[in-house]
Image: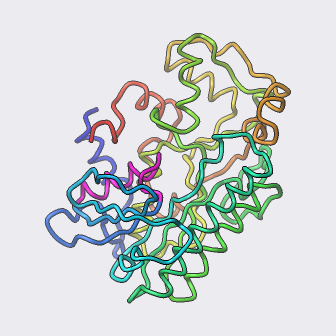
């Protein structure tokens, strides 16, 4: 499938309703100003490429502006902690997407690292919301990232958006993150929390780290293997962001996961099959605890999360099954590579 075909699929990824604003077909007219924090990261750069490709004016808030990748992209410096000239870009923005935060699984969870993970999310979201409440001339829509860690260790039970808050570091982080974003609703803004699962694409995230051992015939599941993996292809995550921006009836938590959650054992079996490699070398749970400490719980426990609200709201997944997602990732160019 070529990049043009994939773009068409993305643009047709939800059922349009009378109150839907189309954020992906505005080229040539009706363009919007959209502010994105975290727009140079693994998810953000793909979102910015999609929005700029549709002709929108995109303002990326970043600590290291550098040169923009698109003519209609503007990179603006911010420190994610204090007011500054960046706030003026909020005054006439129709939408804001908040993806700022340190990567969860990059380093061992020491006490200092956990403070950094929490602070990077809370301070950036607080700074952005304070700016919106002070500067925005009319309430925009805010799409703010969160995580399925909100639900804690879920076991095998299916978790929709109505499931209660769980326990543990990630649950606390997600709840506090969402609470910071929710404050802007007091000013009349529509707020959507995307509770994001494992995002799949080959140029970042967990999958990028898994591909090499599999290609070297050293891949296998993290034991016990029965833990659930709730995943989403990055293209569908971008699609859900666009759907959230475009659909005024959507607010509150949205599970950003594919419909087909799988066990870790199944995930690795499918990955091995797609790569034509065996999935035979399991990673012992005790080894992860020694190497990663508390961070290892991300891989040894899981949640079986369902995209209840997205499916009920008309979003149609481009990659609803794991095998289709991995086939596309392994054998086709990514959207950012194609750009």
Instruction: Write the residue at 78% across / 40% down.
Output: 297
x and y percentages locating residue 2 in the rendered image: 25, 34
Q: Nearer the viewer, residue 118 or 66?
A: 66
**Rendered position, 304 above or below 181:** above
**Left or right: residue 121 compared with residue 34:** right
Q: Quadrant of the N terminus?
A: top left
**Left or right: residue 164 compared with residue 137:** right
Q: Is residue 137 magenta?
A: no
Q: Is residue 51 magenta?
A: yes
In which quadrant of the rendered view does residue 96 lie? bottom left
**Rendered position, 278 above or below 226:** above
Instruction: Write the residue at 53% across / 34% down.
Output: 322
Q: Nearer the viewer, residue 237 or 139?
A: 139
What residue range appears in magenta?
38-54
x and y percentages locating residue 163 in the rendered image: 73, 62
x and y percentages locating residue 287 in the rendered image: 81, 25
Q: Nearer the viewer, residue 96 or 128?
A: 128
Q: Quadrant of the C terminus?
A: top left
**Rendered position, 40 above or below 335:** below
Instruction: Write the residue at 46% across / 63% down.
Output: 37
Instruction: Write the residue at 21% across / 73% down.
Output: 30
């Amino acid at each position: 499938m070529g990049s043009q075909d994939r773009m068409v699929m993305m643009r047709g990824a939800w059922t349009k309703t009378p109150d839907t604003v189309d954020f992906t077909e505005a080229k040539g007219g009706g363009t919007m100003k959209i502010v994105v924090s975290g727009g140079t990261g693994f998810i953000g750069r793909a979102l910015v490429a999609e929005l700029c490709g549709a002709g929108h004016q995109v303002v990326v808030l970043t600590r290291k502006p550098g040169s923009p990748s698109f003519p209609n992209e503007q990179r603006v410096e911010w420190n994610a902690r204090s007011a500054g000239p960046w706030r003026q870009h909020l005054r006439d923005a129709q939408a804001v997407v908040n993806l700022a935060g340190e990567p969860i699984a990059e380093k061992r969870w020491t006490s200092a690292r956990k403070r950094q993970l929490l602070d990077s999310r809370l301070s950036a979201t607080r700074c952005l919301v304070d700016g919106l409440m002070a500067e925005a001339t009319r309430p925009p829509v805010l799409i703010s990232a969160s995580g399925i860690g909100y639900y804690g260790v879920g076991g095998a039970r299916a978790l929709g958006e109505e499931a209660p808050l769980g326990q543990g570091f990630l649950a606390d982080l997600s709840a506090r993150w969402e609470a910071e974003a929710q404050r802007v609703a007091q000013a009349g803004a529509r707020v959507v929390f995307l509770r994001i699962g494992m995002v799949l694409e080959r140029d970042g995230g967990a999958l990028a780290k898994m591909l090499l051992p599999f290609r070297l015939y050293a891949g296998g599941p993290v034991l016990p293997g029965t833990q659930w993996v709730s995943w989403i292809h990055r293209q569908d995550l971008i699609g859900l962001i666009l759907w959230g921006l475009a659909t005024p009836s959507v607010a509150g938590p949205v599970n950003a996961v594919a419909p087909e959650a799988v066990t870790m054992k199944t995930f690795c079996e499918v990955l091995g099959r797609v790569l034509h490699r065996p999935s035979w070398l399991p990673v012992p749970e005790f080894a992860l605890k020694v190497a990663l400490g508390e961070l290892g719980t991300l891989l040894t426990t899981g949640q079986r999360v369902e995209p209840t609200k997205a499916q009920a709201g008309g979003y149609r997944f481009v990659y609803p099954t794991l095998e289709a997602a991995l086939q596309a990732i392994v054998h086709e160019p990514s959207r950012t590579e194609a750009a």
